[in-house]
Amino acid sequence: MKKSIIRDINLASQGDKKLQWVRNHMPILNHLENDFVKGQYFKGKKVVVCLHLEAKTGYLAQVLKAGGAEVAVVASNPLSTQDDVVAALVKDGIKAYAWYGASNEEYLEHLNAALDFGPDLIIDDGGDLVALLHKERSDQIKEIIGGCEETTTGILRLKAMSKEKQLKFPMMAVNDAYCKYLFDNRYGTGQSVWDGINRTTNLVVAGKNVVVIGYGWCGKGVAMRAKGLGANVIVTEIDPIKAIEAHMDGFRVMPMQEAASTGDFFITVTGNCNVIRKEHFLEMKNGAILANAGHFDIEISKKDLSEISFEKKTVRANIEQYCLPNGNSLYLLAEGRLVNLAAGDGHPAEIMDLTFAIQALCLQYVMNNKGNLKADVYPVPDDIDKKVAKLGLSTLGIKIDSLTYEQISYLESWDA
Ligand SMILES: NC(=O)c1ccc[n+]([C@@H]2O[C@H](COP(=O)([O-])OP(=O)(O)OC[C@H]3O[C@@H](n4cnc5c(N)ncnc54)[C@H](O)[C@@H]3O)[C@@H](O)[C@H]2O)c1
């Protein structure tokens, strides 16, 4: 097993403070941690956690370790790693293979080092770890009991693998749990995208035209919070139902080509590639700000942007100016990577409390069902979703009603 690959262990005390802060704001994980300490459910198991390596993820890794697992962490994105948090995890006895700003070669080296750890269970975000296991480390697959996938894009990739009978172990579609996408994708992305953009640009949003590309769960959150900040929100979509939804939610809907000349801010959240490209850049106003919140940095075509620009320079941390021959400058945030993580701290702790509670319980579910689950993509069981929702309500001090016997029988009858 390789020793940890990190930037600087001396950053640990700073990382510890970040971990303590989120620990104080993630009561559902606190509850699971207490249970895991008693139960030691993961004893003898090795877990590789491949997620955005900031404090909330760090705490999830610590919770799994508290449950008896040997844990290694690796970054799912080279620009979201917080070196101080990673150092604190290593001090705490967790293996780590990541540093901020890793090159593509280093990123691959880190993923390989994490797999050298020899996991029984994995948590992936975007599918890179699973893809590497299947493409280059297939001899290791027989050791993997299964795992969990965090995000929409990763689940799309897993389903494509499963359809072609290429997926070789069971994976839980964590993103598709109600307690994940309803809150994480919508409210988490909604808030943290604007946190990332605002702290990076320090520009006003009120009165500006904000173009949200993609009105899925993340896009709804980004548009809703843009409206709250006083922006005029425009939505572009390819799905007619989502387009009507955006219209009824009070937003202008139009094709990207039309929106291109109108927007002051453009935010992509489609999970698709090249949704903003050459013909759109050429129509944009001078000073337009471009940001992506979808999983990969392929939604805004950096290739096209480079090709049509005669100069590119960094004008502020996480802002690159592209100078076009027509005299306009376009500003790309965080190299087109997830703006809320690469230029911010990601979703609020209370939101990730729900998501990571689902992760921890799904990982336990996969382990407990070794041999019963085939190599496929599985939905999160309803009882896990409900358990996390109930724990969430109780930590918020919110009580709800229960059905009476009369109501149950009414709802189950057809001739009442
Ligand atoms: N930034 C974050 O922290 C964060 C959090 C969760 C998910 N994600 C990622 O964000 C992306 C979107 O996730 P989601 O859960 O909202 O997915 P979703 O499937 O709910 O929504 C995506 C939407 O984009 C639309 N779309 C696709 N191609 C388009 C195009 N060319 N033009 C306009 N619209 C288009 C689809 O019709 C769909 O409505 C994924 O890559 C996901 O992994 C990011």
Image: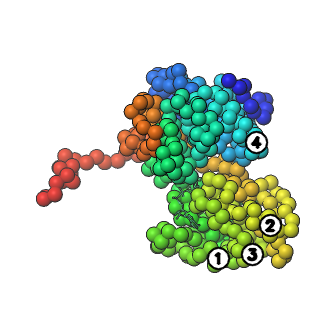
Side of 310 where 204 appears, left or right:
left
Task: Say whether marks 1 and 3 touch (CB < 8 Å).
Answer: no
Please determine whether, in this image, residue 337 is positioned above or below residue 70: below
Amino acid at pointer 3: Leu
Residues under labels 4 and 1: Cα distance? Answer: 36 Å
Q: Circle 1 sits in a helix, a strand or a loop, which is it?
A: helix
Residues under labels 2 and 3: Cα distance? Answer: 12 Å
Task: Say whether marks 2 and 4 touch (CB < 8 Å).
Answer: no
Give the label on residue 344, or none.
Answer: none
Task: Say whether marks 4 and 1 touch (CB < 8 Å).
Answer: no
Give the label on residue 307, or none.
Answer: 2
In this view, the residue in front, 144 or 236, is 144
Label 1 or label 2, whichever comes before in sequence order: 1
Amino acid at pointer 2: Glu
Rendered residue at 80%/60% (across/down): 320
Residues under labels 1 and 2: Cα distance? Answer: 19 Å
Can residue 123 be seen in this snapshot?
yes
Q: Which residue is mark 1?
A: 257
